[in-house]
Image (cartoon, grey):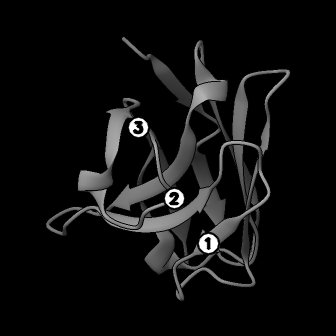
Amino acid sequence: QVQLVESGGGLVQAGGSLRLSCVGRTFNTFAMGWFRQAPGKEREFVGAISRVGGATRYADSVKGRFTISRDNAKKTLYLQMNSLKPEDTAVYYCAAGYFIGTAPSEYDYWGQGTQVTVSS
């Protein structure tokens, strides 16, 4: 069983920055993704990174503002979020899978989520 634990969420003003982290024990085996879910909405793709970090992909809504990265030695995934907007408010989840897909169904393991709130 893969356990993923996110941290780094919080309350920030619009235009600010946050960095999310996700730690996993068997982290290095998987491609990793970030998703988010706002109240009343479906879980949506944010970004993904390949197992060794050579490939990344992003949702259009965050491209140019968010950066996904990983440190396999530390078994940690990151999401650097800059120029945050109120519409970025959501619970953010990290996920592990075998491909850098964009659909939640393509990921096999999930963290518990961390709340990000952006005030206007």
Q: Nearer the viewer, mark 3 or mark 1?
A: 1
Depth check: give the residue in front, 3 or 54: 54
Which numbered tag is attached to residue 113?
3
Quickly name the residue at label 1: 57
Report the side of 64 relative to 63 (left or right).
Answer: right
Residue drawn at point x = 39 percent, y = 59 percent: 36
Depth check: give the residue in front, 32 or 67: 32
The answer to whether 92 is drawn above or below residue 82 in the figure is: above
Helix, strand or loop under label 3: loop
Residue 24 occupies quadrant: top right
Contact? badges 2 and 1 (CB < 8 Å)? yes
Three-letter amino acid code at disc 1? Arg
Helix, strand or loop under label 2: loop
The residue carrying pointer 1 sits among few (fewer than 14), some (14 to 19) or many (20 or more) residues within 10 Å by Cα, namely some
x, y percentage for residue 25?
59, 12
Quickly name the residue at label 2: 100
Helix, strand or loop under label 1: strand
- Tell which residue pokes out farthest to the bottom in this image: 60
How far apart marks 3 and 1 lie (CA) works out to 20 Å
The residue carrying pointer 3 sits among few (fewer than 14), some (14 to 19) or many (20 or more) residues within 10 Å by Cα, namely many
Three-letter amino acid code at disc 2? Ile
The residue carrying pointer 2 sits among few (fewer than 14), some (14 to 19) or many (20 or more) residues within 10 Å by Cα, namely many
Report the side of 69 relative to 93 (left or right).
Answer: right
How far apart marks 2 and 1 lie (CA) works out to 8 Å
x, y percentage for residue 21?
67, 36
